[in-house]
Image (cartoon, helix red, strand yellow):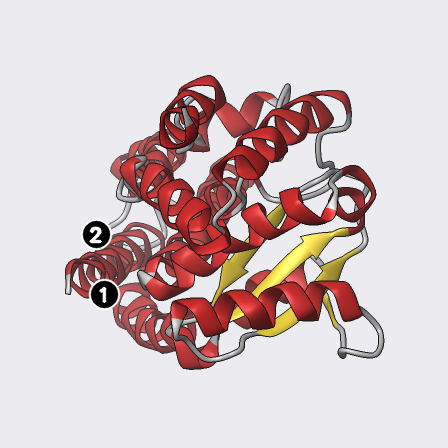
Amino acid sequence: MGNIIRTTLLLAFLTGLLVIVGRIIGGVTGMIFAFIIAIVMNLGSYWYSDKIVLKMYRAKEVTPQEAPEIHRIVENLTLTAKIPMPKVYIVQSETPNAFATGRDPKHAAVAVTTGILKLLNSDELEGVLGHELTHVKNRDTLISAVAATIAGVITMLASWATWIAIFGGFGGRNGDRGSSDFLGIILMAILAPIAAMIIQMAISRTREYSADEGGAKMSRKPWALASALKKLETGVARNPMKNANPSTAHMFIINPFKNVSMAKLFTTHPPTEERIKRLKKMFY
């Protein structure tokens, strides 16, 4: 229920923001047009945000014949968790990582990178997938995907506002527009990234601790998940993900954009050292 409320608030926030931007840029007509766009985007965020994220990373769905080990691990874990079998995807990236998405357990997907398949052993991979399936079971995936989509939209709006201000697509042509429009657009360009950060903060860091605990219990191998997190932290530091949107960082088990300045605005992960420490308490 908590995730449903947060999702509703995020979508309402997106609607209000788009309407304000439309008013600043296009007056009353722009406001009406923005409201229509907001409704379309709200529906799209709810129903298709998972597909948007998967497409963003060019994730390829794989069959049991194409990826037998992953399917075996996921199937065993879903039987333990008593949730439906999700679709399985592979992302072509040397950055070792994984994420889950989908609006509910019946429409879920888990994705792993080629980098993580090279780095982790079977037990460690099982711990990671248990973590991701805990997100699915707890229905964290809807709020994660919607937040990623909305943060991306806000960042895009900030970029548009900046270019409109630079090239003079505002001011002076209508009685209700003028120099205040310029100030409004500049203000939007400044505040939009902050708004995106606020949205990311709606994704509580405590959910990662909860998913770690759930994944450790689901796989019955807390030591394996702790080992995986340590390897992933080192692997990402050596080979951070490039040419991707930092607004999706919260979806991954480890922040994939280490050493990328924009990623700091969107960080939602607790310190990996603390996560490992908590896992160690489960098997000591």
Residue 120 is left or right of residue 101, and the answer is: right
- Residue positioned 40% across, 34% down in the render: 193
Q: Nearer the viewer, residue 119 or 32?
A: 119
Q: Give me the C-alpha separation between circle 1 and circle 2.
A: 9 Å
Q: Is residue 264 visible?
A: yes
Query: Which quarter of the rendering shows the C terminus?
Result: top left
User: How many residues crowd mark 1 within 10 Å: few (<14), some (14–19), many (20+)?
Assistant: some
Query: Which quarter of the rendering shows the N terminus?
Result: bottom left
Q: Quadrant of residue 110?
A: bottom right
Identify whether 266 is placed above or below 221.
above
Residue 254 is left or right of residue 259, and the answer is: left
Q: Which residue is mark 1?
A: 28
The amino acid type of the residue labelled 2 equals Asp
What label sits on residue 176 in the rendered view? 2
* Residue 121: image location, x then y, percent: 74, 43
Identify whether 112 is placed above or below 77.
above
* Residue 28: image location, x then y, percent: 23, 65
* Residue 100: image location, x then y, percent: 52, 59
- Residue positioned 78% across, 70% down in the render: 68
Identify whether 147 is placed above or below 88.
above
Q: Earlier in the sequence, mark 1 or mark 2?
A: 1
